[in-house]
Amino acid sequence: MRSRILAGAALAITLAIGGAAAASAQTGTSLSASPDSITVGESSKITATDLGGLETAQFGLDATPGGSLSATQASVSNGEATVDFTSTETGTFTVTVGDGENVLATTTVTVTAGGSGGGSVATVEAAPASITVGAASTITASGLGQLASANFGLDGTPGGSLSADQASVTTGSASVEFTATEPGTFTIAVSDGETVLGTTTVTVTAAPTPTPSPSATPAADGGLAAEAIWIIVILALLIVAAVVTIIVLARKRSTKS
């Protein structure tokens, strides 16, 4: 009997110590991301430490679109558990770790479209780069990595327009059409929604004025030629009439004689 009581007491003490240790560990849990700043398509290792007696840890993400975890549950080994985080879109993502009921710790990961240098990371081209008013140029951004969509924008030069402000990215490229109703030099920029990734320019000139075809004009002496013909005809008739008159008069004289 005494041995049973001692065994029960030992079990209760063990459970109490284990529960206290777990509770203590949970309140001291920390969560870190390495690295805490990545580009689209890269990964960050999320590590939870000081998980104490937990057997598994639950990982979760906020509602920022594009982020994903390699697993939402990971086994705890020596008080630690890890998962990998990646994203197909830019933004700041909050990752949490919990015991299935309570959130024990949080961390954030910042995802950008390009390298940490912050410069242009996309190649933007206009084809053709010089057009006339009313013509179109295709604006193509390449080297966009795993961005789901790209944003296109114009400077303040009046008269320019784009076929769309946003285009889907396919195999790292996206394109829109540019047209203008006025001449000028237009700058088109492409971005990830937050950071400008690259720019290009299009030069627009006025459409050439069509040259009217020269109309056929009658020769300047055409009228004079026609008048001369009529004068000749009239003179010929007068001559004929004079000849006829002379002949008639001659016959009359010969008859009288």
Image (cartoon, rainbow, N blue to C red):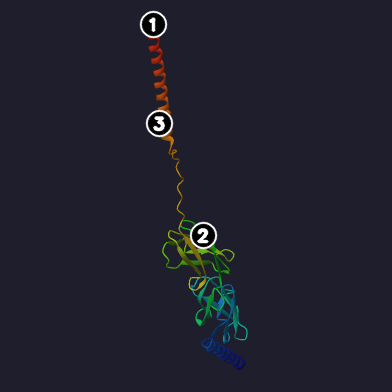
The answer to which of marks 3 and 2 sits earlier in the sequence is 2
User: Is residue 163 shown to the viewer in this render?
Assistant: no
Residue 130 shows up from this direction:
yes
Q: Position of residue 146 (x, y in %)?
A: 57, 69
Residue 233 lies, in percent from the top left, at 42, 25
Q: Calculate the distance from the C-alpha at mark 3 to the C-alpha at mark 1.
A: 42 Å
Q: Is residue 222 left or right of residue 67?
A: left
Please tell me whether mark 3 sits on a helix, a strand or a loop: helix
Would residue 95 appear left or right of 221 to someone viewing this image? Answer: right
Q: Nearer the viewer, mark 1 or mark 2?
A: 1
Q: CA distance from mark 3 to mark 2?
A: 61 Å
Question: Mark 2 is on which residue type?
Answer: Ser
Q: Secondary structure at mark 1?
A: helix
Q: Earlier in the sequence, mark 3 or mark 1?
A: 3
**Residue type at the position of mark 3:** Glu
Given residues 78 and 252, the one toward you in this image is: 252
Q: Secondary structure at mark 2?
A: strand
Mark in the foreground, 3 or 2:
3
Q: Residue 137 shows which numbered tag?
A: 2
The residue pinned by badge 1 equals 255
In the image, residue 135 lies at what x, y percent? 49, 56
Report the number of discs.
3
In the picture of the structure, the residue carrying the numbered disc 3 is 227
